[in-house]
């Protein structure tokens, strides 16, 4: 009986509140109409956003199966074993969204409206962010200005723009974790900007990814090339010196005259053996370097036309009206609560 009594009281309170709100139906109607019109006005003035889509597959490259080689290079203090793949897998996504990559793209130059622009300069113009902002109107990013010559306010605007793209306008992901297919999406109010930015961020990431993946193998290859060139020079010098000594000591009857020749002959044998081993290591190092280079294969380019995202007028009117009605309902509820 107690439960029934409480239930009846709740029903009576809800009925009473409903009748109270029903008295102000005209207010809800007017507010809803005004909110709907505001939504229509907002949707009419809202510029569309273009969204790109680029997919690519990534072959990491591997040095496994080469075995223990480059023995002489190891003696020089270089680690030439198998790669630990520190920069493999989904790390390329974080590299693509990093401040270094995005700022590099934002400061790169492209042609828009038959004029060269930096991406960030054209983005600020296209989005009208300088409009009504006297401080931002004085900040520009000319094509000829070097990054090292930036002032503090330029660095500040560049950093804020990087955050906008990293958090809102650039999406890099691997949709299916079972597959090695990556997807890149860029959004902006300009279709050409969207396409060019997508192509540029993928190209810059690919270049930097190859650089960091092959850095150790490239260092080893460079050292071996220098050592092989030096060893070959020593071998050639020993052969020349032996010929010179033989020409000077034309009388082979004296044993002492043969000592310089024997020394040069020994040097030739040592240098020849070392040169042969180092040349084999050099060829293996070249193979290792080529095998370490990752391959980014584009599957679907960011081609025209881009996906056009625009808020519909009817949808905007309904959303604005619903939100405003809920807000008004909340205000009435709070007023009723505090008045009691």
Image (tube, grey):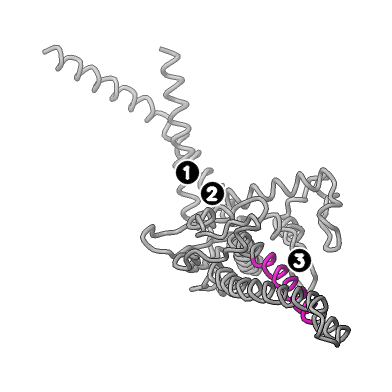
Separation of residues labelled 1 and 2 (CA atoms): 8 Å
State which region is magenta.
221-239
Choose the circle earlier in sequence order: 1 or 2.
2
Choose the circle earlier in sequence order: 1 or 3.
3
Which quadrant of the structure image shows residue 239? Answer: bottom right
* Place of residue 21 in the rendered image (x, y in percent of width and height, measured from the top left): 39, 28
**Disc 2 crowd, CA 10 A, few/some/many (<14, 14-19, 20+):** many
**Disc 1 crowd, CA 10 A, few/some/many (<14, 14-19, 20+):** many
Count the numbered circles shown: 3
Q: Which mark is residue 39?
A: 2
Q: Nearer the viewer, residue 175 or 71?
A: 71
Question: Residue beneath label 1, please?
Answer: 321
Residue 189 sits inside the magenta stretch? no
* Place of residue 219 in the rendered image (x, y in percent of width and height, measured from the top left): 66, 62
Residue ID at (17%, 14%): 5
Where does the N terminus fall, quadrant-wise? Answer: top left
Separation of residues labelled 2 and 3 (CA atoms): 38 Å
* Place of residue 160 in the rendered image (x, y in percent of width and height, measured from the top left): 69, 46
Where does the C terminus fall, quadrant-wise? Answer: top left
Position above or below: 251 against 296: below
Residue sitting at the far left = 1
Choose the circle earlier in sequence order: 2 or 3.
2
Residue ID at (20%, 15%): 6
Which secondary structure, mark 1?
Answer: helix
Quick check: marks 1 and 2 in contact, CB under 8 Å?
A: yes
Question: Residue beneath label 3, please?
Answer: 109
Residue sitting at the far front = 253
Position above or below: 55 against 332: below
Quick check: marks 1 and 3 in contact, CB under 8 Å?
A: no
Q: Which mark is residue 212?
A: none
For the question of whether residue 338 can be seen, the reply is yes
For the question of whether residue 194 can be seen, the reply is no
């Amino acid at each position: 009986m107690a439960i029934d009594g409480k239930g009846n009281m709740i029903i009576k309170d809800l009925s009473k509140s409903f009748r109270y709100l029903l008295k102000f139906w005209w207010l809800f109607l007017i507010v809803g109409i005004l909110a709907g019109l505001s939504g229509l006005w907002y949707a009419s003035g809202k510029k569309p956003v273009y969204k790109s889509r680029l997919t690519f597959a990534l072959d990491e490259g591997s040095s496994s199966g080469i075995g223990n080689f480059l023995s002489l290079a190891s003696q020089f203090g270089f680690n030439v074993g198998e790669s630990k793949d520190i920069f493999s897998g989904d790390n390329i996504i974080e590299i693509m969204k990093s401040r270094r990559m995005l700022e590099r793209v934002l400061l790169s130059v492209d042609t828009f409206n038959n004029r060269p622009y930096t991406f960030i300069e054209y983005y600020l113009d296209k989005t009208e962010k300088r409009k009504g902002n006297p401080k931002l109107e004085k900040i520009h990013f000319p094509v000829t200005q070097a990054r090292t010559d930036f002032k503090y306010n330029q660095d500040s605007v560049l950093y804020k723009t990087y955050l906008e793209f990293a958090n809102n306008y650039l999406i890099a992901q691997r949709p299916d974790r079972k597959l090695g297919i990556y997807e890149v999406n860029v959004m902006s109010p300009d279709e050409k900007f969207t396409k060019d930015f997508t192509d540029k961020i993928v190209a810059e990431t690919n270049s930097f990814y190859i650089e960091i993946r092959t850095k150790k193998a490239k260092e080893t290859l460079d050292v071996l090339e220098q050592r092989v060139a030096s060893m070959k020079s020593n071998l050639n010098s020993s052969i020349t010196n032996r010929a010179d000594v033989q020409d000077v000591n034309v009388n082979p009857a004296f044993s002492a005259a043969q000592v310089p020749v024997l020394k040069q002959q020994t040097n030739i044998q040592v240098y020849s053996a070392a040169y042969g081993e180092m040349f084999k290591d050099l060829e293996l190092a070249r193979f290792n370097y080529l095998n370490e280079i990752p391959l980014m294969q584009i599957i679907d380019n960011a081609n025209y036309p881009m996906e056009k995202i625009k808020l519909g007028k009817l949808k905007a009117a309904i959303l604005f009206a619903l939100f405003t009605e809920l807000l008004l309902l909340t205000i009435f509820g709070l007023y009723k609560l505090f008045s009691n």
